[in-house]
Image (tube, coloured by chain):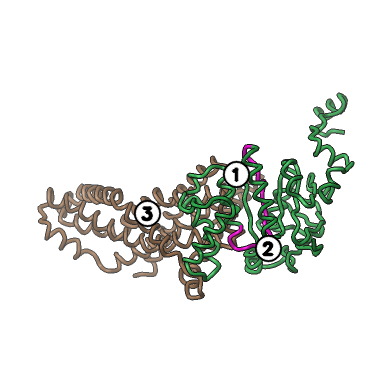
Amino acid sequence: MRSAELTTQIGASVSNGLAYVGTLAILGERAAYYTFVAPFKGKPLRLQRAIAQAMEIGVRSLPILSLITFFNGLILALQSAYELRKFGAISYVAGAVAVSMTRELGPLLTAIVVIGRSGSAFAAEIGTMKVTEEIDALQTMAIDPVHFLVTPKFLAMILMLPCLTIWANTMGMVGGMLFGVAKADFTVGRYIQASLDSLVLRDVITGLIKSVMFGITITAVGCQEGFATRGGAEQVGRSTTRAVVLALFLVILVDLVFTSLFFFFGS
Amino acid sequence: MKTDAMISLRNLRVSYGEREILHGLTFDVYDGETMVILGGSGSGKSTLLRTLVGLEKPTSGEIWLKGQNIATISNAEMDKIRKKMGMSFQGGALFGSLTVGENVALPLRQHTKLEPSTIDIITRLKLNQVGLSGFENYMPSQLSGGMKKRAAVARALAMDPEILFFDEPSAGLDPIIAAGVDQLILEVKKAFHMTIIVVTHELASAFLIADRMVLVDKGHVVAIGPRDEMRASQHPRVRQFLDRVAEPAVAQELDYLQMLTDGTPR
C-alpha cells in the first residue's frame, strides 16, 4: 500500500514537472517565433524596447559580474594550485582556470547573476502587470502579451548572455592571472599564452551554446511565473521568489543535459 | 433607437475549474444603447464582462457579436473583433512604463499604419475628449484616480470602437469624481452613439447612464428591462437590491442550530 502511494506521488510530481517544462517550451517557442519569423511577416519587433532590455540585462550587470567572476577565477587558481602543487605542476594553473571558466563556470556564473537581476525582474514586472489588469488590457486591445512583453526580453537575453559569458570568461582568467603572477612565477604575457594554449575553440563554443540555452530558460521561467501570478501584491513577491528558485534549478538541469551531450556526442 | 441586437447571449455558462459562475444567461444588447449590468459582489457580473471581451472562454452557450459566435472563434478572429471594442478597466490598467499619451497611442501604433504625426493628433484629440488635454507626457503614476480612469477611457476610445465596456467606472472614486466619470460616459454616449456596456453596483450611477439594465444574481439573470421599468419593478430580488436591504440572516434559531451541527441550512 505504502509503496503504491509513494509511486503515485512520485508519478504525479514528475508529470507536473514535465507539464511545467512543457508550458515553458510553448512560451519559448512563441517568443522564438515572434523574434525570428514574425518580423518577416509584417509584425515588427519592438527593437527599442529590446535595446533597453539589453542595456538592463547586459551593460548594467557588468560591474557585479566582473567582480564575481574575477574573484571566482582567483579562487579557482588557489584551489587548483593546492592540488597541483603536490605534483610540482603549479604551472598548469593557467590551463585549469581557463578551461573550467570557459566550459563551465563562465556561463553558469553569468546565468546566476542574470537570474538574480533580470529573471526576478521579469517575473515582478509581468506579475505586477497581471495583478493590475494590464495584461488583460493588452489582450482586449488585440495585442499579444507574449509579442509585446516577452519577445524584447527574449531577444535581449539570447544576445546578451553569450556576450556577458565571454566577458565573464575573460575576467575569470584575469583573476587566475593575479595568482599566477604573484605566486606561480608567471609573467602576464606567459600566463595569457599558457591560457590560450590550453584552450581549444570547442571549449569556448560549447560554453556559449550553453549560455544561449540558459538565456532562453531564464526568460521563459521569469515570464511564465509572471503570467501565472494570481491575486494581489503578495503573490507578485511569491512569483518572483519562485522564478529565481526555479530558474536556478532549471539552469543547472539544462547545464547537466548539455554538458552530457557535449561529453557523449562531442568526442 | 434601432433594435438590432449588437450582442446576443444564448444560455451562456462559464466556469472556473469545477465551479460554475454563470448558469445559463440569455439576453440581448441592442445597437447603440447603454446597458448596465447590475449585481452584487460575487454575482458573476465581472465574469460576464470578462467573457464578453473574450478574456474568459464560456464552457457552453453562445455569444453572438457582429454576426460571429465568439464562444467558438479562434484567437485571430477574436482579435479582429477586439479592434472594434474598447474596454475601460476598474483600476485603469494603464501601462506604468508608458506615458499617458503613449498609452492612448499604443493601439493605434500596433494596429494602424498611420503616420506618427497623425497618431499624435488623434492622441491629443482623444485626451481632449476626456478632459485631459496637456497630460500626454505625464506618467500614469502622476495622475489621480479619476484622471487615470479618464485616461483609460481615452485609450479605449482610441480605435473608434463600436462597443465600449466599462468595469466598475466609479469604484474607488469620491462622489464628485465619480459623478464626473458618469458625465463622461454620458458625453461619450451622446457624441458617438456607440453601444456601451457598464458593469457596476453603484445604483445612482446606473440609473443615470442606463437605457436598459440587467440584474445578475448568483449567476442568473434576475430581471432585465428599461431603466424606468426596473426602477418600478416589484420583483423581490430587484427590490432588495435597489432598496439596499441586507441579506436576511439565518431566519430561525432552529435552522441556525442545524446549520452549525450539519453544516447545511434547511
For image coordinates 48% across by 53% down, the residue present is B136
Is residue A175 visible to the viewer in this orientation of the structure? yes
Q: Badge 2: how crowded within 10 Å, few (<14), some, or many (20+)? A: many
Could you tell me residue B218's position as x and y percent?
79, 44
Assess whether residue B163 is covered by the magenta stretch: yes
Assess whether residue B123 is covered by the magenta stretch: no
Q: Residue A186 carries which label?
A: none
Write down the residue under mark 1: A231
Q: Badge 3: how crowded within 10 Å, few (<14), some, or many (20+)? A: some
* Amino acid type at image mark 1: Gly
Q: What element carries label 3?
A: helix
- The residues colored magenta run B157-174
Residue situated in front as seen by the camera: A210 or A267:
A210
Give left or right: position of A258 versus B256.
left
* Residue furthest right in the image: B234
Q: Name the N-terminal-most of marks 3 and 1.
A: 3
Residue situated in front as seen by the camera: A228 or B158:
B158
Tell us which disc is closer to us: 2 or 3. 2
Write down the residue under mark 2: B162
Distance from label 2 to label 1 (Cα)? 31 Å
Write down the residue under mark 3: A56
